[in-house]
Amino acid sequence: MRSKRVTVRKVLSRVVAALAATVVVTLLLPVAPASAHGQLATSTPLKGTVVREPLTQLALYFTEKPASNAHFAISGPDGSRVDNGWSYGEPKRLDKPVTEYFMVNGVFEPRLYHTGFPAMVTVAHWPAKGRYTASYLSVASDGEAVRGEVTFDYQGRGTAAPAGWSAPTAGPDPALLAQAEGEGSANPGASGSPAVPTNTPAPVTEEQRDGGFPAWLVPTLIVVVVSAIVLLAARRRPAARGASRADRRPSGAAGRGGAATRKSVSPNRKTGNRSGGPARRGRR
């Protein structure tokens, strides 16, 4: 029973080690290229930072000009909205270029974007300290949805809402939602977003990038193969140990019998008779 417990422990430890190695390999795999362009490049304030002074506007910089019917919203700690419309800002050079990938003649080619195109979202007031979230939804020139959010912590003084102001409740434009879900017109320019240039290659999509081979399948196969190898090795070892013990028993028994035989024919030290029988008496 003890040997079986030791074997089970070894099997479990090796399976855990195999899983850990699989996780490490998965983390070291290269990150897949972005499937669309027009993505968020940077923002003011940056995501996860602390704001200590009341800002009148938030700036969200994209790698291309947002669609004219793009939707932006800012929510306070209690979930109520504090945004008051948005407008285009002046493009600026990015501190860190953004890389996006395109499929050209069957090869992924990187393209650097050095300019950020901002959407300036007006903040009506800062009702309280806490976590604020700026969300956005647009459609890029390739027809892909551009959506996400920027969260930050506000620790500045509270400000009052403008006279006669009420929190907005309107959601995204239905045409924008239809395009974002792939149900709208194939031409993004129909609803005001930039049209796709004729000489611009199509961006890399998830299907083109992976070629129909799911990324999660590789680590799964590794885990299955390693686990099978460990289990087979664990099954063979007890059999091998049993065979080795069976081989040792005859030799050990023979050794003990030989020792007993040698003892039976050992010389009689007292009488000096080597045959082990009774000593002969001499003539008187």
Image (cartoon, rainbow, N blue to C red):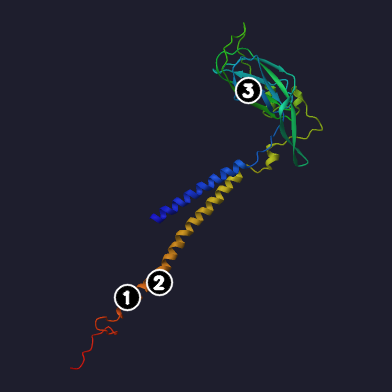
Q: Which residue is located at x 50 percent, y 53 percent?
A: 231
Give, as a three-letter code, the residue at label 1: Ala
Label 3 element class: strand
Residue 225 in the figure: left or right of residue 94: left
Residue 119 in the figure: left or right of residue 280: right
Q: Nearer the viewer, mark 3 or mark 1?
A: 1
Q: Nearer the viewer, mark 2 or mark 3?
A: 2
- Residue 160: x %, y % from top left: 59, 9
Residue extending furthest right? 199
**Residue on which disc 3 sits:** 135
Q: Nearer the viewer, mark 1 or mark 2?
A: 1
- Residue 205: x %, y % from top left: 70, 36
The image quarter in which residue 206 lies: top right
Give, as a three-letter code, the residue at label 2: Ser
Label 1 element class: helix
For the N terminus, the image quarter is bottom left
**Residue on which disc 1 sits:** 260
Q: Which residue is located at x 35 percent, y 76 percent?
A: 258
